[in-house]
Each structure stands twice: as structure tokens, then as C-alpha cells.
Image (cartoon, coloured by chain):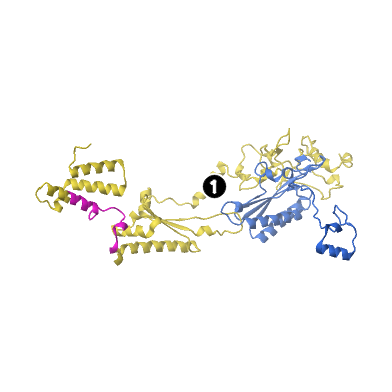
Amino acid sequence: MVAVSGPLLAVAGYWALLSRCGGRARAAAAAYSSVPAVSSRGGKQKEASTRRTSRPSQLIRSHAPPRTERMAVDQDWSSVYPTAAAFKPASVPLPIRMGYPVKRGVPLPKEGNLELIKIPNFLHLTPPAIKKHCAALKDFCTEWPSALDSDEKCEQHFPIEVETVDYVSAGTSIRNPKARVVTLRVKLSNLNLDDHAKKKLIKLVGERYCKDTDMLTITTDRCPLRRQNYDYGIHLLTVLYHESWKTEMWESEKTEKDMEEYIWENSCSQKNALDTLLRIKASENASNVTKEELLASEVVKNYRNSVVALKNEGETENNMSQYKESVKKLLNIQALP
Amino acid sequence: MGRFGDSRVSPSLSPQVVSWSRSCAPPALGAHRDLHTTPVCFKTRAARVRVGKGDKPVTYEQAHAPHYIAHRKGWLSLHTGNLDGEAGAAERTVEDVFLRKFLYGTFPGCLANEVVLKRRANLLVICLVVLQNLAPSKLYFLIGYSETLLSHFYKCPVRLEVQTVPTKVIYKYL
């Protein structure tokens, strides 16, 4: 081999010669498809000198084959890819090709394939690897408290929910201004409020109360730090609670327009109904019935219920038919359908 | 004395006549101030290797123009800065430009392809495809030197993942 190798050591055929020296049978004909001596950083790459011309042939040593050729089928894959790493063609024993092929060609092979390196791979997250992660993390976990085994119990013991968001991004800075936002959520049924206090609280918070879920949501982001925003939110909740229990002097000026729900007592509907009934009774010359008797009678009570239902719940089929029946009974007109 | 690039050669005028023509410029005296234009060239030339005689070897990265990104090509730099509502895109881009220049100079003549940069939280992973020009010991030294210098410079862990190939992987010849 020594006599032949001298004049034949052109750069192009150099690596192909080495492969023959190494004893691997591979056709080294095509210019780009012959990549026999690809090794990753941990591979054994033996090279005598850095000069591209005139390498003494005695110092040329064969290249080690890639690691994939010595891998057992049942090897421990989590030791090949223990952490997230770029794609290493000499460590992954799969014949993968990637890339848009030239006409009448095939995609490029995996050796030196930049497209395979660019994409993130999950070779480090096979199911056995994840099982190992979980087993290692188990030592640091504590049991969920057995007393809190249902949602209702959690809500009963911890009525206030505090929500904060942490942001992770790629870069040298961990700061993110969106992380200072704090959201407090509490159900008003868990707070100790009487009727007046609850109505006053709902009026004070306005948009932040959701009637369907009975949930008060306070979102604070006016302070630069999350701890400050949390403290401010708790302070707001405390102030709202105490203020809603107090009764100010000007609250006695509450008009019918401020009322949250319809109250029939002392309304014009009650006045009209009683007036009508009294006049009917007077025209029939019946015995003088008093207002209290009228109010206590069944028909008036029915009428009251139907009017209150209509005003508070809106117009539904049920409500309208109930109202119709109660008016018919009130005015004693059974004849109409 | 014709002005270069001018389609018309103006006759050599004495200075007095020239200055007079500049002030009131009667067309008969022939001192013109023309704007020279070529027909407009509408071609985009960004990141494209022009077709030659068929002897120019070209890698997959070079062969595909920028409009093939996300169709046939991936991205060379992956970070969260360009996502909606995320900050830091400009800083990451400036870092990328510096890193590519730095690596192009540190591994002279050895880079077989573009450098791929990946960022994972604080960690910066630089993926290189290197030709087998250098001795392994020299290559290892350059890798260690780059890692140390860049991590001290950017104050974050920097990891180089190097792959070696015997020659540049040629996609086609243009």
C-alpha cells in the first residue's frame, strides 16, 4: 500500500482510500454520497497533520466507524440521548433522509444534513426516559392532603383563589413585565354578608362580579412587583368587605331606580291593583273590605307573585301564562279563554 | 471631455458661456443637465446563487432562496423572541449576527455549512458542521475556547455541538 499511496494521494480520493484501509466495504464513487468517515465530537478521529498536501502515509490511521454500527437493538437509549441535544447522525441508528430532492433524486442523507439539525428533536423524551424522570422526581414530591378530596372541600377551606402567571422565554433575561399581574377570585357566598352588604358590594365592584357563577374577580397590575399586587388585591377585598357592612347616611336616598330587583310592596302595581279592587267592591256595594284583607287574599297574592316573576326574570311562556291566570282571577273574568 | 455615462456629448463650452447657460438655460446652447437612467432591473437578488455553467457546487442551504423558508427550509436560529407578545427579538438577532461572524473567524475554512443557533431558556446551543481539515486536538481547543469566551461574553451557558464531515455536502451544481 505504501508504494501506491504516494502519487495517488489526491485530496478527493484521500478519504476514500482511508476507508479501504479501514476495511469497510463501501462504494466511494459519487462525490457527495460518499461520507464514510463521519464522526461526532466524541468519535475517534485520528489524523496525522493539518496540512492538506503531502501527508506522510505512515501517519495515516483509519477512521473509526460511527457509533451506530456497534449499537445493540435493546440498548439503553436514555444513555445515548440523556438530555435535549441536536441531531447526531452518528449516534442515531436510523436511515433518515431529509430535504427536498433534486429531480429524479432522493432527499439528502442524514450525514451533515443541516435540516435535521435545525429542527428540535425529542429523542431524549422516549417513554422509558420519562418514566425514569418521574421516578427520580418522586422523592421530591409530597402527598396531596387526604382531607381535601373534593372540590367543595377545597372551596370551603380555601375560598380565595389567587392566580399568577410565570413566563419563560429564550434569552439571557428572566424578567417579563406580564408576570406582575395577580388575579383574586372569591365566591360571595363564602363571605359573611347580609342582604344589604351583598347588594352594596355588588354595586361597589360593578363589572368584576359575575352573577351566574357568584364570583368576584379582582385583577391587579398597577404595582411593579407581584408581591405588591397581591397585597393590594387582599387590601381591596378587605376594604370592600368592611365598607359594604357600613351604612352611610346617603344610602337612605335610594330610589326605585337604584333597586336591583323588583319589590311589589309600595309599588304602583300594588296601588293600582288595590284601587281597582276597592272600586269593584264599592260598585258591587259589598261590605267594606279593608286593604289588609285584600292584600292577604289569595288572588292578590297570586297577582303579586306573577308580577314579581315577570319583572325579575323577564318574559317567559310560564311567566306570561301565570300572569294571565292571576289577572283573570283578580278581575273575575273566567269567560275569556 | 464627455461626462461619463452620458448619452449625449456636450460641446466644450468656455466658462462664461457655461455659467450664463446655467442661469437662464436656453435649450439652443446645448448645456443640459440630464438624468441618466438604465432600464429598471426588477430582479430580487436576496440570498440567491445565480445559475452558472453547471460547475458551481451548492449546498442545500444555498440552493434554496428565502421564499422556501418554512416550505423546504427550516430556520437557522430558534428562539422565542419572534413570537406574539414576546420581547427581546432585536437582542437575539444582534447576538446571532455576532455569533456567526465570530464562528466564521474562529474556524477559518472549516465550516461546511451555516451555523445553527438554538436557545433553550438561558442556554445557547450552537450547532456546527465542520470539515475534517484540522487536527482533532486543534478542533477541540477551538471548541473549548469558543464556549468559554462566549459564555463569559454573554453571561449564559454556551454549548457547541459539532459534527464533522469529510467534504461539504453538495446538493446540486449550478
For the C terminus of chain A, the image quarter is top left
In the displayed orientation, state which residue is furthest to the left. A287
In the displayed orientation, state which residue is furthest to the top. A104
Give the mark count: 1
Give me the chain letter of mark 1. Answer: A
Is residue A114 shown above or below A242? above
A261 within the magenta span = yes
Q: Residues within 10 Å of mark 1 (few under 14, many from 20)?
A: few
Residue A170, picture quadrant: bottom right
Secondary structure beneath dot 1 equals helix
A319 within the magenta span = no
Q: Residue at x 86, y 53 (%)?
A: B8
Residue A272 or residue A108, whichever sits in front: A272
Q: Residue at x 81, y 50 (%)?
A: A50
Colour in which the image shows chain A: yellow
For the N terminus of chain A, the image quarter is top right
> Which percent across, then down, holds residue B125?
65, 52
Q: Which residues are magenta?
A: A252-276
Q: Which chain is blue?
A: B
Residue A137 or residue A184, whichever sits in front: A184
Q: The residue under label 1 is which amino acid type?
A: His
Residue B58 or residue A69, whichever sits in front: B58
> Which percent across, then down, holds residue A183?
44, 57
Residue B68, picture quadrant: top right
Residue A292 or residue A91, whichever sits in front: A292
Is residue A73 shown above or below B22? above
Query: Residue A194, can we see it?
Result: no
Q: Residue at x 67, y 61 (%)?
A: B153
> Which percent across, then down, holds residue B113?
73, 47
Q: Residue at x 28, y 41 (%)?
A: A318
Mark 1 — residue? A133
